[in-house]
Image (cartoon, rainbow, N blue to C red):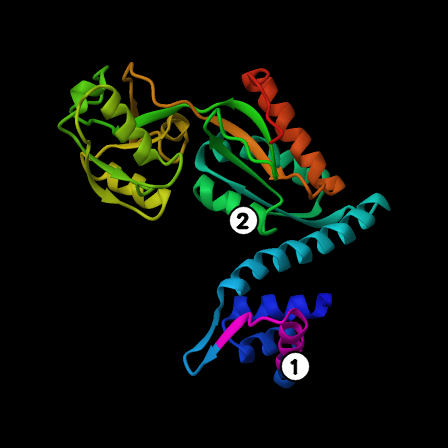
């Protein structure tokens, strides 16, 4: 098994066809096909199903893709680490972030980091926690800033708890119930959610849990959306409510249109955490960014209650 074979395999999956992958890698399609056949022959399994409709991963291929991506990313990081140790401060950092730490933590820090490391490119991926952690495991992200329940711990992940997440009921300014102080006053309201039920730690699950705790039955969730921007736009233009970090209603972009309803009941606790693979050491530049994020978090929020290195 060679790195060339792994790169070819990952490119075919990413591009969706042998022809597109050959164009991307600038190699002959026959050479690419031979590389995949050689890899499958060496492993003794079929990684890709071929048909006139295109290619698809076999179950074994899906598992192998995770490993292959992680290996290629580790090789890239190893090369960057050597260059950075020689004083060549360049490379790429890929991180995942949810909306709360993006606003409260990353944005205040990243400007200073980029000024210090102008040749290091930072790529930010947004999404919900479960999706981002899956991308850590398959090597597509260096680390993630996201909320986790206090009891969460995984043996393959390093989890550093930074500060307690502060969710809130978000409504448009001028909402008829903008000033109520109890979730009971919102029992007849309709809700929009960015995260479907079943996603661990999802906002919809926290809303359902709070309604159950207060014996209010099921909340009236009438819409779900694919992104935060869609959700907040719907809330701005209607009387629907949503659950999102309180800090969003204070951002310049949304402060003129959104408000946080000050209910006294507490949602299930979550800690904003810095999560990474235990087996993948950071490059020098990534470690510097992580250190800056942790230091800023402690400056603003104080030391975390506890840290976990799963």
Q: Which residue is identified by label 1?
A: 34
Q: Is residue 296 magenta?
A: no
Q: Which residues are magenta?
A: 33-49
Q: Name the spot of residue 277 as percent of width and height, x first.
A: 63, 41
Q: Residues within 10 Å of mark 2 (few under 14, many from 20)?
A: many
Residue 170 in view in this figure: no
For residue 12, which quarter of the picture? Answer: bottom right
Q: Name the spot of residue 61 as percent of width and height, x first.
A: 54, 65
Choose mark 2 or mark 1, whichever is in front.
1
Q: Residue at x 67, y 82 (%)?
A: 31
Q: Name the spot of residue 206 as percent of width and height, x first.
A: 32, 29
CA separation in Å, label 2 and label 1:
29 Å
Q: State the residue in front, 229 or 143.
A: 143
Outermost residue on the right side: it is: 86
Q: Main secondary structure of the magenta part?
A: helix
How many marks can you see? 2
Q: Residue at x 80, y 46 (%)?
A: 84
Q: Which residue is identified by label 2?
A: 135
Query: In the image, is 270 to the left or to the right of 90?
Result: left
Q: Which mark is residue 162?
A: none
Q: Is residue 42 magenta?
A: yes
Q: State the residue in front, 170 or 19.
A: 19
Identify the secondary structure beneath mark 2: helix
Identify the secondary structure beneath mark 1: helix
Q: Residue at x 41, y 27 (%)?
A: 247
Outermost residue on the left side: it is: 188
Query: In the image, is 38 to the left or to the right of 108?
Result: right
Specify the quadrant that holds the C terminus: top right
């Amino acid at each position: 098994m060679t790195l060339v074979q792994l790169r070819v395999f990952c490119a075919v999956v990413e591009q969706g066809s042998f022809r597109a992958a050959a164009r991307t890698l600038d190699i002959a399609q026959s050479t690419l096909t031979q590389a995949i056949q050689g890899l499958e022959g060496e492993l003794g399994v079929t990684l890709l199903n071929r048909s006139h409709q295109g290619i698809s991963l076999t179950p074994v291929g899906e598992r192998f893709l995770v490993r292959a991506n992680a290996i290629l990313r580790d090789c890239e990081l190893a090369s960057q680490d050597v260059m950075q140790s020689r004083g060549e401060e360049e490379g790429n950092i890929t991180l995942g972030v949810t909306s709360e730490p993006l606003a409260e933590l990353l944005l205040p820090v990243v400007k200073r980091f980029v000024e210090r490391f102008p040749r290091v490119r930072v790529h930010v991926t947004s999404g919900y926690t479960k999706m981002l952690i899956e991308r850590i495991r398959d090597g597509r992200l260096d680390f993630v800033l996201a909320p986790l329940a206090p009891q969460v711990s995984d043996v393959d992940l390093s989890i550093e708890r930074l500060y307690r997440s502060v969710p809130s009921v978000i409504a448009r300014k001028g909402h008829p119930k903008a000033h109520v102080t109890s979730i009971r006053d919102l029992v007849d309201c309709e809700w929009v959610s960015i995260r479907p039920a079943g996603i661990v730690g999802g906002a919809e699950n926290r809303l359902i849990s709070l309604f159950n705790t207060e014996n209010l039955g099921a909340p009236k969730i009438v819409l779900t959306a694919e992104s935060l921007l869609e959700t907040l736009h719907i809330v701005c233009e209607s009387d629907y409510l949503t659950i999102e970090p309180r800090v969003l209603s204070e951002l310049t972009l949304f402060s003129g249109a959104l408000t946080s309803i000050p209910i006294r009941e507490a949602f299930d606790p979550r800690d904003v955490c810095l999560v990474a693979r235990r087996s993948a050491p950071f490059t020098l530049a990534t470690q510097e960014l992580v250190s800056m994020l942790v230091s800023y978090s402690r400056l603003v929020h104080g030391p975390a209650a506890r840290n976990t290195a799963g």
